[in-house]
């Protein structure tokens, strides 16, 4: 009587387990890379929109000097600072539905009017983008 100690099907099954394990690991790495790429894409689009809004505010400062707030739509005053709020799609909104905030801090020293412009997420200290605009009066 002959006995088989090993079968070909068990070798095939072991090979299939290794193949599935390899593809599972490769899929996990790809999903992780796609998630990181999405985060970088969102961050870069936020930076691009913040640069556009800050440059627009800087042009208003350069055009009007101390009266720049009249050129900015939906501008709100917070003591010395002028604030503009934007929703997640970068449309002007009120403070309640805001995701982003543009803060203009004006300083007048003699004939020089300067404004520090910073765009950040609401509730975060670190700005997405900031710049300084100046105008000689």
Image: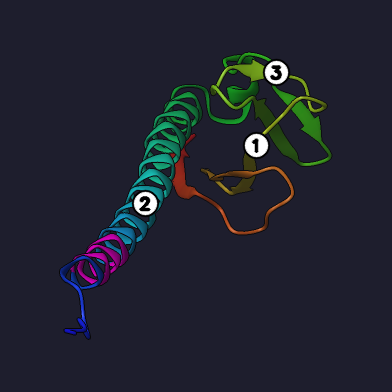
Nearer to us in this view, 86 or 13: 13
Residue at 58% across, 48% down: 110
Q: Nearer the viewer, mark 2 or mark 3?
A: 2
- Residue beneath label 2, please? 31
* Image spot of residue 119 (x, y percent): 56, 42
Residue 99 located left or right of residue 28: right
Question: Residue 63's x, y, as percent?
Answer: 44, 22
Q: Which residue is mark 3?
A: 93
What crowding class fits label 3: few (fewer than 14 Cα within 10 Å), some (14-19), or many (20 or more)? some
Q: Quadrant of residue 59?
A: top left
Q: Which one is in front in this view, the residue at disc 1 or the one at disc 2? A: 2
| Vertical arrangement, residue 10 with respect to residue 103, above or below | below
- Residue 132 x %, y %: 46, 48
Q: Helix, strand or loop at disc 1?
A: strand
Kindly identify which residue carries mark 1: 101
The reply to whether callout 1 and callout 2 are in contact (CB within 8 Å) is: no
User: Which region is colored magenta?
Assistant: 12-21
Quadrant assignment, res 36: bottom left
Earlier-in-chain disc, 3 versus 1? 3
- C-alpha distance separating marks 1 and 2: 32 Å
Tell me the crowding category of disc 1: few under 14, some 14 to 19, or many 20 or more residues within 10 angstroms, Cα based: many
Asked whether 14 or 1 is in front, the reply is: 1
Q: Residue at x 21, y 81 (%)?
A: 6
Q: Is residue 108 left or right of residue 54?
A: right
Q: Which numbered disc, 2 or 3, marks the residue that appears first in the sequence?
A: 2
Badge 2 crowding class, 10 Å Cα cut-off, few under 14, some 14 to 19, many 20 or more, is few
């Amino acid at each position: 009587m002959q006995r088989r100690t090993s079968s070909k099907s068990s070798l095939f099954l072991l090979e299939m387990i290794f193949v599935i394990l390899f593809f599972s690991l490769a899929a996990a790495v790809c999903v992780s890379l796609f998630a990181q790429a999405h985060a970088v894409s969102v961050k870069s689009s936020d930076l691009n929109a913040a640069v556009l809004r800050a440059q627009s505010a800087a042009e208003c400062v350069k055009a009007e000097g101390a009266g720049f707030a009249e050129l900015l739509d939906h501008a709100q005053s917070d003591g010395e600072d002028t604030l503009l709020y934007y929703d997640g799609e970068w449309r002007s909104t009120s403070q309640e539905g805001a995701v982003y905030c543009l803060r203009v801090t004006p300083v007048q020293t003699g004939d020089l009017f300067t404004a520090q412009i910073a765009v950040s997420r609401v509730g975060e200290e670190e700005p997405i983008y900031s710049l300084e605009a100046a105008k000689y009066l």
